[in-house]
Image: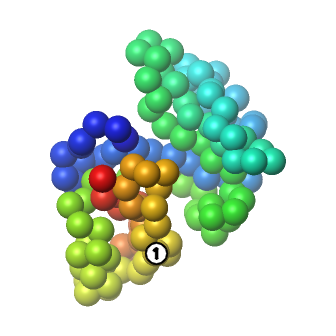
Amino acid sequence: MSNKLKIGSIGWIDLTVNNADEIKDFYSAVVGWKPENVSMGDYNDYNMISAESGDPCAGICNKRGVNSNLPSVWMAYFIVEDISKSIASVKGFGGKVLVEPKEMGGQGKYAVIEDPAGAVCALFEQM
């Protein structure tokens, strides 16, 4: 997410699963993405690269560490102007904060929320 994206747009999608090594191969075969290792120390998560453009277009992550409690869904990261204000709105409108705002690799801050209907997504404030 190095370029500034428009507020309200989807900046990224990723999937967190117990078997990321198998699932990255599944999506490589089904969608045509090429996996790129992202070292997490003693295991890899994956950026999935578009075969056509060569750009990262999604992530497939292991359900470990900070991701251990995330649901196994394709999670959209919505770009917000101010993550603190957005979190206040989540709470004010009956949603839940599943992961409190955290720094994301010097790119900005993210949080994972659940809306009142039970749908899960992430919010991302760019630096």
- In terms of depth relative to the viewer, which is nearer, 117 or 95? 95
x, y percent for residue 50: 47, 21
**Can you identify the residue that label 1 sits on?**
100
Residue drawn at (69%, 57%) of the image: 63
Residue 125 horizontal/vertical position (percent):
30, 58
Quadrant housing residue 46: top right
Q: Give the camera-side residue of 88 and 94.
A: 88
Tell me if residue 68 comes above or below residue 2 in the rendering: below
The amino acid type found where label 1 is placed reads Glu
18 to 31, vertically: above or below = below
Task: Name the residue rendered at 47%, 29% in the picture.
Answer: 56
Question: Residue 69 appears in which quarter of the rendering?
Answer: bottom right
Q: Is residue 92 above or below residue 46?
A: below
Q: Which residue, as the protein is rendered here, is positioned at the far right? A: 42
**Could you tell me if residue 80 is visible in this image?**
yes
Q: Residues within 10 Å of mark 1 (few under 14, many from 20)?
A: few
Q: Residue at x 30, y 53 (%)?
A: 127
Which residue lies most toward the front here? 106
Residue at disc 1, secondary structure? strand
